[in-house]
Image (spheres, rainbow, N blue to C red):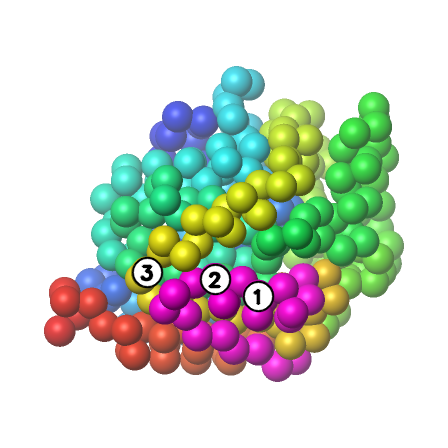
Amino acid sequence: MPEIELSAGTIDYLDTGGDGPVVVLVHGLGFDESVWADVTEELRGGFRVVVPVQPLGSHRRPMRPDADLSAHGIAALLGEFLERLDLREVTLVQNDTGTAQLMVGAHDERIARLVLTSCEALDNYPPGLQGKTLNRAARIPGGLFLLLQSFRFPALARMRTSLGGMAKKPLPKELIARWYGPLLSSREIRRDFAKFCRGGDPDCYLRAAERLPSFTRPALVAWGAEDRMMPPATGRRLAELLPDCRYVEIPDARTLVPLDNPTALTAEIRRFVKENPLPSDQ
């Protein structure tokens, strides 16, 4: 994978290249670009797909010790990534974490279209039992380290109260090992992960919601119809705040929409881009 040096450190990214409209796919906490593998493959024929590996636990390169890896810091880092690669008129697609919302009014000048799939929003933070458990563990000395040990055992990770509750399809043990291997093997990666977990402001997404009405560019909220961690009711409320937004529920999907139903999500992204052409597309 190519890499790029940013203010927080060096990150890897996937770039399919090509002259098509740019789609940037953004993964959530404890995942990497592999969450988007099927969507990337389905989009690559007509789009340039770029997937940064954010420093959220499954990254392979530790960030600098002084890096700001709070939710706002990650949002700023994504804005820096778009600028450094000179990506323009981007369709930004976010899953799981809600940091793309924090870019509105702060780092959104390169975003032409915004897609939010099941993610933290409004008062659903930390989200669900999984999010609340992680939040509590992050505030107990040694708590995160002990919690992460469960991911050594796929059967425990697949439980509904853990990672398994985020997906309708059974998660392959190879993916679980890929996602959590860096956290289990590197103290520096755990440090980066802990920064995000401990740096969360419980009201940050409520405050972000106050700025969403200022985002007048096209938006799509595509929520997992069977999501329990990020309830569809949250998605509908989120969509109502965006002036030019369509809301859709993706069937047979929970939080990890790109894994559960990549074909349906890809179809919605294609439709969204087609229905909202930019001057440069015409």
Answer whether labels 3 and 2 touch (C-beta < 8 Å).
Answer: no
Residue where numbered disc 1 is placed: 237
The type of residue carrying mark 2 is: Leu
Please check the rendered image and state whether residue 240 is part of the magenta-colored stretch, yes or no: yes
User: Residue, x 84% and y 51% (percent of image)?
Assistant: 153
Q: Position of residue 137 (x, y in %)?
A: 81, 36
Determine the CA span between mark 2 and mark 1.
7 Å
- Of labels 1 and 3, earlier in sequence is 3
- Of labels 3 and 2, earlier in sequence is 3
Local crowd at mark 3 within 10 Å, few (<14), some, or many (≥20)? few
Determine the CA span between mark 3 and mark 2.
10 Å
Q: Position of residue 159 (x, y in %)?
A: 85, 60
User: Residue, x 74% and y 66% (percent of image)?
Assistant: 228
Residue where numbered disc 2 is placed: 241
Q: Which mark is residue 216?
A: 3
Query: Toward which corner of the image does residue 19 lie, by quadrant?
Result: bottom left
